[in-house]
Amino acid sequence: MNGVSGVWRLLAGDGVGGADGLALDEALMRRYGRGQPDCPPTLRLYSYRSHCALVGRYQDLAAEVDLDACRRTGTEVSRRLTGGGAIVMGRGQLGVGYLDRAPADRRPRQIIEELSAALAAGLALLGVTVAFHGKNDLETGGRKIAGLGLYVDPAGAMLFHASVLADLDVEFMLRVLRVPAAKLAGKAIAAVTDRVTTVSAETGRPHDATTLRPAIAAGFAGTFGAQLEPGSPDQEEQAQAAALAAGRYRSQSWLDERSMVGDGSGSALLKAPAGLARIYLSTHGDLVKSALVAGDFNELAPEVVALESGLRWRRLDENAVAAVVSSSGAPGALGVPAERVVAAVLEAGRQAGRRA
């Protein structure tokens, strides 16, 4: 990382709202895109109010969150700037935000893996040994204990997000999130706990965000040789956060950013190393009117965007679809064979035809 030593700013808080918490993270990030040489990293360790449902930047909101259940339970819903999957946050989960300038010589996965080492060091202080796994998880004993995400803006400012599970109300999570694999298993809670664990479960002692905060802070300080100095957002950051909360994170257009609506639409799932993708098509007869690829990605590859644009106004003919898939480069970006992408597109087209 750029700021591997020196004095960092440490921000702490509890019980923040979904839109407010995400907006402040973005406001804090923006200062690092101005090229200020004397701007040290900021580490923010905070908790959301119970409860907030947050989807990743590239996910379809309605496919991941039960919006009716959220309304019934008073669960605030918003969309993160970072990628990854849908999560439920509250006082039982520690939110981590690391803000800095992005290293020019690192790819996103490398940055995530390097910063995950600081989380691992902090959890080790609590007696929990974890390892970076997959595209954006920390695991212990084969079960996920933290999710990670990253966003780098065009000016080079970086926001790293992590949600560390001190505790988790699995029953509540299943009420407000759509977790198809767990629900199809018949024993939903057992299916989730087979794949997810918490600091409380691993240590045999109750933990929440406040008890995790000192250990995670120490993990960052020790890993990067930094001195953490408690602080607070300045007036400009607070004003910018308020504007972002109102103009972006509470707006319906932001919530619906990766959503496909309308008649004659269909979708198909495509499991890939880059994440679980959902390919959506809106069709008119055998013509593709629009296409969208949503998923728990950390970043949206330009090849996937090329696939979306290339499919528009193409006929749902296997040869035509195969030509678009091949020229887009999307199979390589997603890490799956081209024929699987073609099959998913054609299946989405069949679904759309049945609903037209």
Image (cartoon, rainbow, N blue to C red):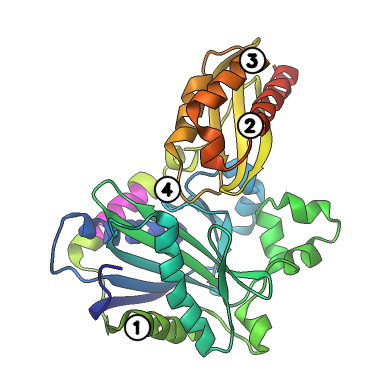
Please identify the residue farthest to the top as the structure is shown: 285
* CA distance separating discs 2 and 4: 34 Å
Q: Residue at x 50, y 89 (%)?
A: 125
Query: In the image, residue 227 lies at what x, y percent?
Result: 27, 85
- Vertical order, 276 against 204 (above or below): above
Amino acid type, label 1: Ala
Q: Earlier in the sequence, mark 3 or mark 4?
A: 4
Q: Residues within 10 Å of mark 2 (few under 14, many from 20)?
A: many
The residue identified by callout 2 is: 341
Whether residue 15 is visible to the viewer of this picture, yes or no, is no
Say which of marks 4 and 1 sits in front: 1
Tag shown at residue 319: 3
Magenta-colored span:
238-246
Whether residue 30 is visible to the viewer of this picture, yes or no, is yes
Q: Earlier in the sequence, mark 4 or mark 1?
A: 1
- Vertical order, 58 against 2 (above or below): above
Query: In the image, residue 177 lies at what x, y percent?
Result: 65, 54
Say which of marks 3 and 4 sits in front: 3
* CA distance separating discs 2 and 3: 13 Å
Query: In the image, residue 57 lies at what x, y percent?
Result: 47, 47
Q: Quadrant of residue 288?
A: top right
Q: Residue at x 62, y 76 (%)?
A: 167
Amino acid type, label 4: Arg
Quarter of the picture containing the C terminus is: top right
How many labels sit on residues? 4
- Vertical order, 138 against 354 (above or below): below
Does residue 314 show up magenta in the picture?
Answer: no
* CA distance separating discs 2 and 1: 44 Å
Q: Earlier in the sequence, mark 1 or mark 3?
A: 1
The residue identified by callout 4 is: 250
Amino acid type, label 2: Val
